[in-house]
Image (cartoon, helix red, strand yellow):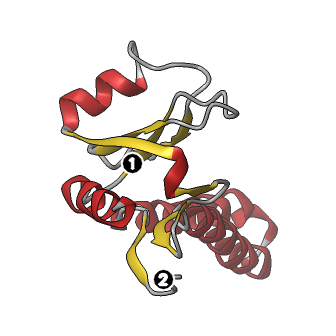
């Protein structure tokens, strides 16, 4: 049994979102300005920290292919239950997350990542028709899935 990871990607949030976290703290500090310096500083620190936790949490999603499984945040699927994988460019990815989308599909969707991979689910016991995975490296993920499936 293979125990080494052949693919690991963290779907981290863009750098600009960290600036928004700081901006959230500044806004909270401005709201608390009439109450004095201590509340202002507490608002700056607390607002920035809370917003940073939110950005970090949203950007902590991972896609891994390890030990014969495709592992994402909520899904652990054996590669034997997966069919063909398709790399999607920005236009095709947009179509699959909008008008081509199936409500039964598993979607690890990050709007700040324009490309994706669509992987068919072939397990007859699973009602999920496909997986939609936002990824910055769709061709590499498809290659790893194909080689790992044998």
Query: Eyeballing the image, is 45 above or below 146?
Result: below
Tell me the SS state at disc 1. strand
Q: Quadrant of residue 55?
A: bottom right
What residue lies at 60% left-to-right and 31% top-to-bottom? 128
- The residues bearing labels 2 and 1 have C-alpha atoms spaced at a distance of 25 Å
Q: Earlier in the sequence, mark 2 or mark 1?
A: 2
Q: Is residue 80 left or right of residue 48?
A: left
**Residue hosting label 1:** 134
Work out which quarter of the rendered image holds the C terminus and state it: bottom left
Front in this rendered view, residue 46 or 33: 46
Q: In the rendering, at what x and y percent does residue 42 appear?
A: 75, 78
What residue lies at 62% left-to-right and 61% top-to-bottom? 30
Query: Eyeballing the image, is 22 above or below 117?
Result: below
What residue lies at 39% left-to-right and 12% top-to-bottom? 99
Q: Is residue 53 left or right of residue 116?
A: right
Contact? badges 2 and 1 (CB < 8 Å): no
Q: In the rendering, at what x and y percent does residue 60 appear?
A: 55, 68
Q: Quadrant of residue 90?
A: top left
Crowd around label 2: few <14 · some 14–19 · many ≥20 (10 Å): few
Tell me the SS state at disc 2. loop
Q: Which mark is residue 22?
A: none
Q: In the rendering, at what x and y percent does residue 64 appear?
A: 47, 68
Number of numbered markers: 2
Crowd around label 1: few <14 · some 14–19 · many ≥20 (10 Å): many
Q: In the rendering, at what x and y percent does residue 48 appear?
A: 61, 71
What residue lies at 43% left-to-right and 60% top-to-bottom? 17
Query: Eyeballing the image, is 9 above or below 128?
Result: below
Q: Quadrant of residue 36?
A: bottom right
**Residue hosting label 2:** 2
Outermost residue, bottom side: 4
Front in this rendered view, residue 12 or 144: 144
Select label 2 or label 1 by which is in front: 2
């Amino acid at each position: 049994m293979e125990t080494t990871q052949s693919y690991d990607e963290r779907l981290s949030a863009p750098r600009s979102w960290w600036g928004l976290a700081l901006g959230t703290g500044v806004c909270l500090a401005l709201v608390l300005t009439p109450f004095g310096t201590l509340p202002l500083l507490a608002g700056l620190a607390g607002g920035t920290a809370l917003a940073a936790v939110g950005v970090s949490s949203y950007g902590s999603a991972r896609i891994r292919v390890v030990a014969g499984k495709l592992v994402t945040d909520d899904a652990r699927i054996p590669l034997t239950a997966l069919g063909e994988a398709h790399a999607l460019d920005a236009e095709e990815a947009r179509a699959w997350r909008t008008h081509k989308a199936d409500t039964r599909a598993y979607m690890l969707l990050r709007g700040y990542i324009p490309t994706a991979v669509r992987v068919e689910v072939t397990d007859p016991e699973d009602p999920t028709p496909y997986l939609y995975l936002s990824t910055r490296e769709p061709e590499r993920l498809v290659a790893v899935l194909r080689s790992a499936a044998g």
